[in-house]
Amino acid sequence: LQIAAVPDYVISETPLYKQVESSRDYYAAQTQRLQAEVERLFGEVSELKTSRTEFEESLTAESAAQRQALEAEIQRLHGDLVRVRHHRDQVQRELEERRAQDAVEDQKSAELKLLSDVRRERMNALISENKRLLACIAVLKGDRAAFETYTDAELSKTTAVADELRAKLEQVARRERQLAGRLEALSVQGDDEAQAKSPQQAGEGETTRLVSELQNARDEIERLQLRMRKYEEILGGVAVNESGYIVDEAAKASELAAKQKRVDDLTLERDGLAKTSEMMERELQTICETFSRLEEQNTSKVWDLSAKEQAISRVIAEKSKYEEKFIGLNKDREAQRTANQALRNQNAKQLEHIKAIEERDRALAQQLSLAGKEAEKATLAWQTTQTKLQEAQQRAQELEEQARALEEQARVATQALNERTEALGAAEHEKRRMQETLDAAHRRLAEAEKITDQSGLAKLCADYKALLKCPTCRTNFKSHVLMRCMHVFCKQCLDSRIETRQRKCPSCSEPFGAKDVRQIYL
């Protein structure tokens, strides 16, 4: 009956049932864990998609705004750079033009200076020649004072010397005539005053005035007499009576004619020299005027040159200012370029981060798909396990039936075994008794052999000692065994072989290690 209907507690105690039940519990727990993991992964994927979308939108908006700002800044800097370059090129062109004009003007100034130097030398030569001619005229006239004046080194370089001398000569002649008339008037007045002198009518003041005028007239007469003697030296001596007429007019006629001819010749020569001198004076005046104009032109050129130098200085200052501004703009451009490069690097890093997030999404999707596949596999395994469980239950029922049959057979076999065990115990008891009898006989035999042969016992003891001694050194007793080959040696021999790295058994040459050595106790 037990074999035909196996109870549940018996089936539940079988190892196969316990294995199937543990597998079912394991797969059920695994299925729940995988379902929870799948739900968690779905939630994380949805959150990551949402955050990725928001991050991409914010990143796109931020990058677009930064790109627009940078493009506007780059356009502004490019415009400033183009304007500064244009202004720099314009200033450079103006500077080159100014330099070319200054070079031409410098060349012109040098040429004008050379021309003015030549004209100055020519003018000095003409002045020297004019002085020489004026000195010749003075010699021809017999005027030593004029000759000394014209040959003086301190003579002024004015061109109106002849006119001035001529005017002075006319003024002296007029003064001479005035003094002569006044002298005659004073002479007549002196005679009248000598005849009708009245102390009561003349005053001391008038007397003093007349005395001073008389003294001045006498001085003037002396000067005129000196000049008259000079003229007489030139024209010759003339005798004049009290009435003012020339004495020996007939005798002096021929001499006067010769003198007159000589005077005419000298006058003609003088007129020619005067005209020549006037022409030279006019030419000299023209040269002086030209030289003055050249001087004015040079002065104006110098002022223009200074003004141009000031303009060049201003242009250079503006150039320096614009160069500094250009350098500043270059620095700003480099800073903007660096910032742009940094933004590009940041954009690249963000793209890499996006790619990493996409890779992570793909990995999560793959993990999700794998988890789904594993869930499907777990479901299939659970279904298979259920099928196997049903099969196992059927098999368990069959096994229960077989177990009941086997239990019956085991009961019968147990009874037979008990009977045989009792018989075997009796046989064992008999065997032990016989063994004890045999051991006693052996002991008696050994004692008899000891008594009969003492030499054999000594040899036996030597053989036993040889067995206990180490086979390598044959001095020390065996104390350690090699676990690989089970040969026994002393500790000293094994330590020496381990230290010398000759780790082979001396008996069978089997290699061994330090862990293969074990101690034995005899």
Image (spheres, helix red, strand yellow):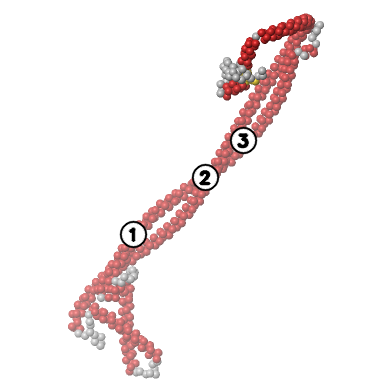
Q: Is residue 176 left or right of residue 71?
A: left
Residue 105: percent from left, percent from top: 39, 55
How far apart are the two marked residues, 2 and 1, measured between alpha carbons? 52 Å
Dot 3: element: helix
Dot 2: element: helix
Image quadrant containing the C terminus: top right
Residue 319, placed above or below residue 203: above
Residue located beneath label 2 in the image: 330
Q: Residue at x 36, y 88 (%)?
A: 211
Badge 2 crowding class, 10 Å Cα cut-off, few under 14, some 14 to 19, many 20 or more, is some
Residue 181, placed above or below residue 158: below
Q: Earlier in the sequence, mark 2 or mark 1?
A: 1
Q: Which mark is residue 60?
A: 3
Residue 80: percent from left, percent from top: 53, 46
Task: Identify which amino acid the numbered label 3 is placed on.
Answer: Thr
Dividing the picture into quarters, in which one does residue 304 lie? bottom left
Q: Earlier in the sequence, mark 3 or mark 2?
A: 3
Q: Which mark is residue 115?
A: 1
Say which of 412 and 21 sits in front: 412
Q: Residue at x 54, y 41 (%)?
A: 337
Dot 1: element: helix
Q: Mark yes or no: residue 474 visible.
A: yes
Task: Identify which amino acid the numbered label 2 is placed on.
Answer: Asn
Dividing the picture into quarters, in which one does residue 33 lie? top right
Q: Mark yes or no: residue 275 visible.
A: no
Say which of 313 and 222 sits in front: 313
Q: Is residue 301 left or right of residue 168?
A: right
Task: Identify which amino acid the numbered label 1 is placed on.
Answer: Leu
Image quadrant containing the N terminus: top right
